[in-house]
């Protein structure tokens, strides 16, 4: 059964592994909090041990340049897709309050994205990310 929606994570292609892993976690948590029914049902293994439900969507993790991330963010916003951006302002802030203060002083043209999580109708997400390579 094919899903009518799609979720992708797009990371800046030059990230070190630890930064990429952190960005993926931040983006997943932030996007998951915005989506209804973002978790599947809990399950049990053959031994009867419980396992918490996970996101039922496949999550391709793609790579893009800084310019491509900016383009995807702008087009996702125009198309009213659900998009979460993790940026260098956030990554370099020590507290959330510090992040909000720094963000308020950052011009949109100066925003450097570490990664994006994009969710919406499959065809729209594919138009924005279909040509990108897998990360790693």
Image (cartoon, rainbow, N blue to C red):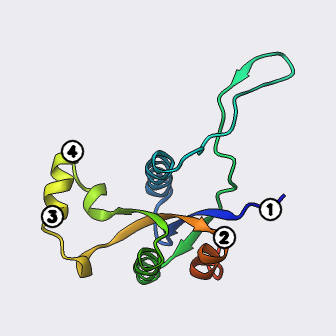
| Quadrant in the picture for the C terminus | bottom right
Query: For the point 31% across and 56% down, which residue is it?
Result: 91
Circles 4 and 2, Cβ within 8 Å, touching? The answer is no
The residue wearing badge 3 is: 104
Residue 105: x and y in percent read: 12, 68
Picture quadrant of residue 5: bottom right
Spatial CA distance of label 4 from label 3 is: 14 Å
| Quadrant in the picture for the N terminus | bottom right
Circles 2 and 1, Cβ within 8 Å, touching? The answer is yes
**Number of other residues with Cα within 10 Å of mark 2, as a class: few under 14, some 14 to 19, many 20 or more:** some
Q: Is residue 135 visible?
A: no
The residue wearing badge 1 is: 2
Does label 4 or label 2 sit earlier along the sequence?
Answer: 4
Residue 19: x and y in percent read: 43, 56
Picture quadrant of residue 132: bottom right
Q: Of residues 77 and 105, which is closer to you in this image?
A: 77
SS for tag 4?
Answer: loop
SS for tag 2?
Answer: helix
Does label 3 or label 2 sit earlier along the sequence?
Answer: 3
Spatial CA distance of label 3 from label 2 is: 32 Å
Query: For the point 57% across and 66% down, which residue is it?
Result: 120
Does label 1 or label 3 sit earlier along the sequence?
Answer: 1
Circles 1 and 4, Cβ within 8 Å, touching? The answer is no
**Number of other residues with Cα within 10 Å of mark 3, as a class: few under 14, some 14 to 19, many 20 or more:** few
Spatial CA distance of label 1 from label 3 is: 41 Å
Does label 2 or label 1 sit earlier along the sequence?
Answer: 1
Q: Of residues 18 and 48, which is closer to you in this image?
A: 48
Spatial CA distance of label 4 from label 2 is: 35 Å
The residue wearing badge 2 is: 122
């Amino acid at each position: 059964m094919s899903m009518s929606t799609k979720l992708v994570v797009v990371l800046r292609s030059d990230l070190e592994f630890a930064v990429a892993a952190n960005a993926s976690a931040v983006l997943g948590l932030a996007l998951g909090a915005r989506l209804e029914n973002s978790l599947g049902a809990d399950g049990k293994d053959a031994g009867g041990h419980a396992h918490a439900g996970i996101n039922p969507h496949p999550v391709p993790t793609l790579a893009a340049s800084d310019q491509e991330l900016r383009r995807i963010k702008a087009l996702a916003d125009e198309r009213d897709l659900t998009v979460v951006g993790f940026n260098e302002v956030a990554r370099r802030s020590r507290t959330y309050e510090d992040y909000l203060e720094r963000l308020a002083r950052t011009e949109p043209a100066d925003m450097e994205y570490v990664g994006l999580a994009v969710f919406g109708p499959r065809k729209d997400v594919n138009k924005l990310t279909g040509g990108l390579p897998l990360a790693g």
